[in-house]
Image: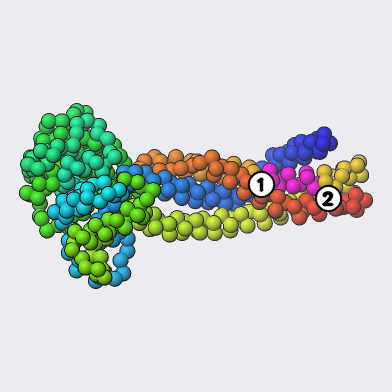
Amino acid sequence: MSRLYFEFNESLRIAFAQIRANKMRSALTALGVIIGIVAVTLMGTAINGIDRGFQNSLSMLGDDVLYVQKWPWGPVEDWWNYVGRPSIKNEHAAPLNRIIQSTPGSLLEVAVPCVSQTGSVKKNDNKVSNVYILGTTAEFARISNVDYREGRLFTETEASAGRLVCVLGYDVAEALFPGRSPLGDTVAIDGQPYTVIGVLVKQGAFLGLFSFDNQAVIPLNAYKRYYSARRDSELRVKITDKNRMSEAREELVGAMRRVRSQLPGERDNFSINEQQAFKSQLDPVKSGIAMVGLFITGLSLFVGAIGIMNITFVSVKERTKEIGTRKALGARRRTILLQFLIEAVAICLVGGVVGLALTSGVCLAIRAAMPSFPVVFSFNLVLVSLSVSVVTGVVSGFVPAWGASRLDPVEALRYE
């Protein structure tokens, strides 16, 4: 064991001495490995970032909420079967809640009507455009898991009376009231004065696209007063156990069919949407990134492996007399094999470390350019990258190292 340990240390020392003696050659040889490691780590970072962003976005939407809407989420091929559906109305919430309350052991907790459109919010000379204006009831507090930076949601009395009160998203409040609290102040939402009674905490964006901080929540009856009643509404239904989502979905389908007075055999004239629909749309994106990344990684590592194999063959030729001398002095075949194998692996490891450093720099740049995109550079990616580097070195260096170990010492000493 001690002899093997000595041979390993000596081979390691010789390998790094050779790399230092041939810096440019070693750098060019490791270039393919560097590109491959950058590709595999960026691919893993992108996939992890998408997963993290998706999970964060689900927590914002509420992973225990079902959405009753006219259209399903995702692409629709037979659109003609959906365009003629009757709209989802705010008035459907009341009978649906009565059905929920009268069902023993129901998996549904409450249905909340919501209707929305984009508008502008203004305070003096400050104005925010394309704000998500959401009209809902006081029951919205039961389905929303968002905290308040300050203030509160409107009460049942305020909602029923349609009072002109609002809750602002974080970015809207910061843009209109920089450096001070907006509570009790008045803003103009599409020209109508609303008193600010609450501000939501900063939530971020959904997959870096739709910002949850660019919204204003107002009572539904106030919304009806100033906006078109012909817009499609939606019902957001909170469930009691998110681990039984499919069962809750089936119960909601049955309840909505009763609300819509549909006969047995009739096709549902509504859609039940859930966050899982987004995941099914993201999976092809992740698969595409993985396939492209694996192709680039494989191609780069293949080219890098050929380069390492070639340079190891050249190194064996250049040091044939040295090999003959060492074998004449009693060096074993495994010693020679280990020496050149470690040299090949060392070049790959250096390439792997450089690749990881470059990926870290790219990740820092992405964080600076797109703060809302979750960049996840995990420790597992480091382990995978270094493992790939080692495997590439072993595979590419074994054949020339084996050939070096099999050289005849007499022939090697006579080599010119």
Query: x%, y% of residue 112?
Result: 20, 48
Whether residue 215 appears in this view of the structure is yes
Task: Tell whether position 344 is magenta.
Answer: yes
Residue located 24% across and 34% down the image: 148
The quarter of the displayed image where residue 23 is located: top right
From this view, report whether residue 6 is shown above or below residue 79: above
Which amino acid is tagged 2?
Ser
Q: Amino acid at mark 1?
A: Val
- Whether residue 215 appears in magenta in the rendering, the answer is no
Mark 2 = which residue? 405
How many numbered circles does the render carry? 2
Q: Where residue 162 sits in the image (x, y, percent)?
A: 8, 43
Q: In the image shown, does 47 or 396 lie closer to the viewer?
A: 47
Q: State whether residue 133 is above or below residue 147.
A: below
Q: Which residues are magenta?
A: 336-348
The single residue placed furthest to the front in the displayed view is 104
Q: Secondary structure at mark 2?
A: helix
| Callout 2 touching callout 1 (CB < 8 Å) | no
